[in-house]
Image: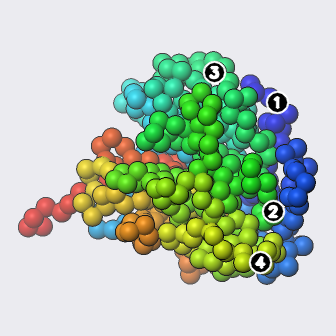
Amino acid sequence: MFNTTLCRRVLLVAGAFALTAAVGSSAFGQAGFSPIDKSNPATSKQDTGLKPHATPPTVTPADKLPLDKIKLPAGFKAEVWSSGHPAARTMVEGPKGTIFMGTRQLGRVYAITNKDGKREAKVLLQGLTQPNGLAIKDGALYVLAINRVFRYDNIEDKLDNPGAGVELTDKFNLPDTVHHNWKYADFGPDGKLYVQVGANCNICEINPGIHGQIRRYNADGTGMEIVARGIRNTVGFDWHPVTKELWFTDNGRDWAGNAGPEDELNRVAKGQEGAFYGFPYCHANGIPDPDVKKPNACAGVTLPAALTGPHSAGLGIKFYTGGMFPKSYQNVAFIARRGSWNREQKFGYDVAVARISGGKAKIEPFLTGLLDEKANTFHGRPTYVHQMKDGSLLVSDEQNGAVYRITYQAKSAGR
């Protein structure tokens, strides 16, 4: 179903990003916003011989998953929670415990349930264009696939036949450009639906009224407001449990060398909604772009709360509020870093934690081992994190089509 022209435009090239120069064809282009697209390495002045690391999504048998590679702090344990759902990224949980998973590459939405004491993954929806954006509200599943938006009411009662859903596409009025527009969406503490609209290029001047934003809407798609601007590609955000401020990851530009500019963790401070975060003119902690130039490129830019590494590809972020992990992890943000897609010395492929203090953050390792730095190879790509009701943490592995469950148990006294 949903076999539309938009669906046929999925950019799927052996699992690698298809970096194209299609920016200029966008129906949303306006005079004064020139598509200086440097995504093609053959034309980028900063190219240093980088090349993509193709990682097509696979279904790795459960007994072949790289569980033995995973390293965690003392007391933490990883286990395979589910498998057999290739390319799955985002995770949201319904009121009855169903885990819904969105994809970027395969056009599917999965539903994972417990059946007869066993965990079962099934394809709930398919044929959509990059339905990465999922959100839950009042028992309804919201699915965002580039510019198309659907709501499936009482979805957990309709897992065998979800139907067509209620289409809200016209009300949300999202651009149909595919590049960096696989969605992330979530309902905030204010009850509004927050949605990202990424840049429609690797590096170019964008229309700031359309791209490079985080927006928020009423649940029915009305009342759109722009919360943050100048963002290249955030596919993960969450709200601090105490301050209720919005924090988001942002992936930096490509083809400017191995060193970065580094990816970012940003904060929307109270009273600073609508702030500008630099794209395309200023990156990281104040680095002017070498291709898209303007005087005083970093003036007025809200700089990151922390840098998250060169081409680390931070995606999902969640603040921990559960009772299972030690108190030192309360209100700490877990960030799934998918890992570099074209950096010569690979980086990321892990889960990091961000410890927040005074509007800044310190990045520390948490789940490691999937990257073999010596061999410069990797065994999996963590993409999103989800806190379960019991306080455990789920980590999706897009490459292997699996989810790992992280638990903690303190050692008994006397052992």
Q: Amino acid at mark 3?
A: Gly
Q: Which of the colour schemes (rainbow, by chain, secondary structure, one colour) is used?
A: rainbow
- Label 1 secondary element: loop
Seen at 25% across and 50% down, the residue is 323
Residue with the mark numbered 2: 205
What is the spatial separation of the Cα atoms under label 3 and label 2, in whole angstroms? 36 Å
Q: Are marks 4 and 1 in contact (CB under 8 Å)?
A: no
- Label 3 secondary element: loop
Task: Categorize mark 1 by other alpha carbons within 10 Å: few (<14), some (14-19), many (20+).
Answer: few
Q: Is residue 44 visible?
A: yes
Task: Categorize mark 2 by other alpha carbons within 10 Å: few (<14), some (14-19), many (20+).
Answer: many
Please identify the quarter of the rendering in which residue 377 is found.
bottom right
Query: Which mark is nearer the camera, 3 or 2?
Result: 2
Task: Categorize mark 3 by other alpha carbons within 10 Å: few (<14), some (14-19), many (20+).
Answer: some
What is the spatial separation of the Cα atoms under label 2 and label 1, in whole angstroms? 29 Å
Figure check: 163 above or below 355:
above
Q: Amino acid at mark 4?
A: Pro
Residue with the mark numbered 3: 165
Q: Earlier in the sequence, mark 2 or mark 1?
A: 1
